[in-house]
Amino acid sequence: MSPEPEHTHRLVPAEDGSGVTLLTLHGTGANEDDLVPLGKELLPGAAILSPRGKVLENGMPRFFRRLAEGVFDEEDLVARTHELAAFVESAVEEYGLDPAKIVAVGYSNGANIAASLLLLHPGLLRAAVLFRSMVPFELETTPDLAGTPVLMAAATGDQIIPPDNAERLAGLLKEARAEVSLKWKQAGHALTYEEVEEARAWLSEVITDLS
Ligand code: MLT
């Protein structure tokens, strides 16, 4: 018997036949409800699995601990990534989701743990949208992410994620043979409407190739 999913989470059942589940991963200080509207906008009708990060930083939920802004507690990050992967696997069983069609959509801290999931659990995610993400940790071995489309939405004026760090993450993912599309905007850490629109268009193309 599989363990109960251990993250507080929301599950929005699918209303279409695509079989896709969006795994929405929020930023620092948000929760399992906050990205549900974004998920609905990005891929209307898809199932949404939306966990809440288990770490609290001054009362704000996150997916892993950090020592300072942009300085991650790598041991915690790796452990939390495995824990999140186990949650996804048990939720797949619990809710009868298609394990081959889990697509991550992460923002900021959520995008960073999505990047970590890609690198530590290749094959778990069929595709990923990373809004404002950076290199989660230094890789010891390069995973094989061939056939995994990844959209990275980065901003030149991001106060939290240095542009060269986002470039470096794109480089790592490319080295792992992911199909990376890195899009730059002249914006800050907050997402722009245009980027949501671009992600929606990108996802609808990616999804067509899945079915
Ligand atoms: C992180 O801690 O994951 C990044 O610095 C982004 C954020 O502020 O959450």
Image (cartoon, rainbow, N blue to C red):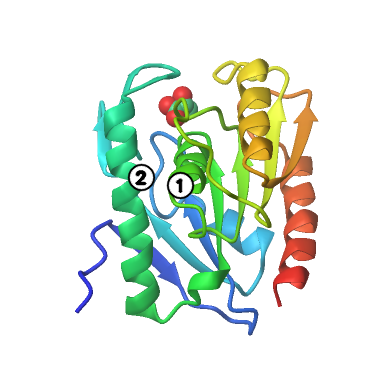
Mark 2 and mark 1: Cα distance apart in space: 6 Å
Residue 126 lies in what quarter of the image? bottom right
Q: Residues within 10 Å of mark 2 (few under 14, many from 20)?
A: many
Could you say whether the residue bearing mark 1 is in a helix, strand or loop?
Answer: helix
Q: Seen in the image, is 117 located left or right of residue 76?
A: right
Mark 2 in CB contact with mark 1 (< 8 angstroms): yes
The residue where tag 1 is placed is: 117
Amino acid, disc 1? Leu
Q: In the rendered view of the protein, which quadrant contains the N terminus?
A: bottom left
Placement of 134 over or under 91, stated as above or below? above
Q: Residue 12, position in %: x, y?
A: 47, 71
Q: Amino acid at mark 2?
A: Thr
Q: Residue at x 25, y 34 (%)?
A: 56
- Label number found at residue 174: none
The mark found on residue 81 in the picture is 2
Task: Pick the residue in front: 98 or 186.
Answer: 98
